[in-house]
Image: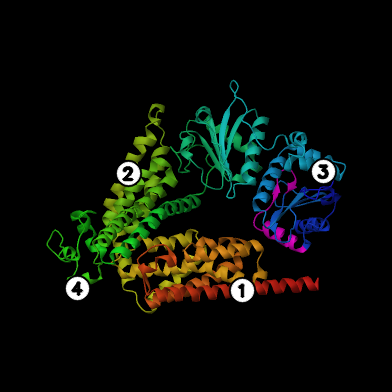
Amino acid sequence: MTDQKSLIEPGLVALDVDLGSTKEEVIRGLAGIVADTGRAEAEGLGNDAMEREGKSATGMPGGFAIPHCRSAAVNTGSLGFARLSNPVDFGDKGGPADLVFLIAAAESGGADHMKLLTKLARALVKKDFLDNLRSAESEDRIVELVRGVVEPQTDAASSKESAGAAEGTPAPSSSGDKKTIVGVTACPTGIAHTYMAMDYLTNAGQDMDVEMIIEPQGSSATEWISQKDIDRADAVIFATDVGVKEKGRFAGKPVIESGVKRAINEPQKMIEEALAAANNPNARTVAASSDGSDGSGEAGTEGKQLGWGKRIQQALMTGVSYMIPFVAAGGLLIALGFLFGSYQIPFVADHILGNFSIVDLPTLSDVTGAANDAGQALFPATQTDVLPGSGILLYLGAALFKLGSLAFGFLVPALGGYIAFALADRPGIAPGFVAGALAGYIGAGFIGGLVGGLIAGFAAAWIGSLSVPRWLKGLMPVIIIPLGATLVTGLLMIFVLGRPLADLTTWLGDTLNGMSGSSAVVLGIILGLMMCFDLGGPVNKAAYLFATAGLAVDNPASLKIMAAVMAAGMVPPIAMALSTRLRPKLYTDYEIETGDAAWLLGASFITEGAIPFAAADPLRVIPSMMVGGALTGALTMGLGVASKAPHGGIFVFFAIDKFWGFLLAIVLGAIVSGVTVTALKSISRAKADRVAVEA
């Protein structure tokens, strides 16, 4: 029966044992069982499993728990199992767990680890499978049951018998007056909870005689629910911790929303709420009333809708995420325009493109005498010496700069448009884009784009929540909501908010332009701290938006802010890469490999390269990164470094004034952060070693 290549064998199974009264004791006991088979080192596996357990509890309804981790202490991927005589609390509100699986994956087996977790989690949803585990009389029987699930090629028949075909949950056939509910489940990682929520809802639907057609938007390719099934559905359930892909497909359907865990804990209750919404003509619907407002008497039900604070945060992050491609493409094209046409190309780009062509190239003398429509020189003749003498370089520089400027011009409209989209789905896009464009027209800048996008989203969601005749509902998302929300937002921006927002933007710009000396250094420190606080999260994005939205080649202060933000954002990945080389024993093999990649990520200004390290050890990594980021921001401001490019890191060196200062600030900040995080981790390791020795 023993197969060394198998994930589970009798030696990895413990039946009716007491491993302690806490989940840590149980996990470490299981780690010891795995280690006794020669597949892992007990202490390292136990530490890694407890570190993962600290991020989120692994207890599940039904009295089981699935602690899991990838660990350098594991040399053979293994699945340990204990049936406890003394059930232990693993964090599920339904009660303690008497069945505990420890998934011990080797460091290099990330994908296998997640596949195993998904297979096992979905099998454990099946009541028959749990009953078989609880009634099994021998270790061999446990191995047979589990192999049938996680290694179905070993015993396909056993898989079907014990897991109830856990690998897929086909949609039941429709019959008569049977109610139909469609839904989406999704968790941040797209693995266990996504599919478990789907199975819990499907099983509950079978018990309640409700047809459930669930779409798991997981880590693998999504199999979309057909539009035919959506159209005939009575209601929709969204059990997600992330945004729903293609949410507009469900437009007009009564909807119940919650986090993914609620579908696991309370599937019957969610289905009951969905059935009640289907019978309520005033129930909240997808897209047409996607603002989360009280659209029915049931709206206050626990878990039915997301809180306003969370919705606004998600909306702002959505807007920034969709805006960034415009920033990257436009900014880098502008930088290339500078490379070929010099930093004076903005003043003559329109003149060159309007009067010359690729077969009729301009000369330097053509540009030197260029004037605008009012007869004024585009720039002093003494500055033309920085322009390239080559006609092809002039024309190419003008073309690239113009392309970049046009792309960059969508920055604020895209910000406003996709903030509104996040609040009101597709009907919010048009009013949001108009609000962003209007913010640019009245001089309100990115602040106006933020405010205008929120107003447009709220207006579109409110209009969509109005009760209208059925014949009019089809026109709501296409005509009435965009038109009404655009009118409300536009008139409110023009008549009420436009001037105050423009004045605020002007004051902010004047204040920044006037910063020098110590005040500029303080601003650099603040921006550096923000860039390194959450490594690509909302605070980081806010600082980046602040820099890019005001970037202008004729605004020296904006160029310095851009340099400080970009340099500080490069520090965390480089610092972590440095730390993995200073003391590799503090890191797993996987982290060392990640550190090798982080050199390039940091050099390219991809702050997210440090996220794997911060996720594993936030209390030591994040403060260390903030220290170095603050130093880098202060140095770039103090040295007067300026960047005309909003992205690209060291690879846009040609668009950075005082590039030596830019490099110096990054190197010093990375050294400070790298040394600090190494020291903190070393102290922690030394303390752990002392505790182990004393024990």
Mark 1, secondary structure of its residue? helix
- The spot of residue 667 in percent (x, y) is 49, 74
Give the crowd class for mark 3: few <14, some 14-19, many >=20 residues within 10 Å: many
| Image height of 91 relative to 565, above or below | above
Instruction: Verify whether residue 109 appears in magenta.
Output: no
- How far is the residue under mark 2 from the one under mark 4? 47 Å
Tag 2 or tag 3, which sits nearer the N-term? 3
Residue at left offset 65%, top offset 42%: 196
- How far is the residue under mark 4 from the one under mark 1? 52 Å
Mark 3, secondary structure of its residue? helix
- How far is the residue under mark 4 from the one under mark 3? 86 Å
Q: Which mark is residue 142?
A: 3
Give the crowd class for mark 1: few <14, some 14-19, many >=20 residues within 10 Å: few
Mark 4, secondary structure of its residue? helix
Q: In the rendered structure, which segment of residues is drawn in magenta?
A: 43-65
Q: Quadrant of the C terminus?
A: bottom right
Give the residue pinned by disc 2: 486
Give the residue pinned by disc 4: 382
Residue that sits furthest to the bottom in the current view = 517
Nearer to me, 184 or 45: 45
| Image height of 62 relative to 170, above or below | below
Tell which tag, 3 or 1, sits nearer the viewer. Answer: 1
- Residue type at mark 2 is Thr
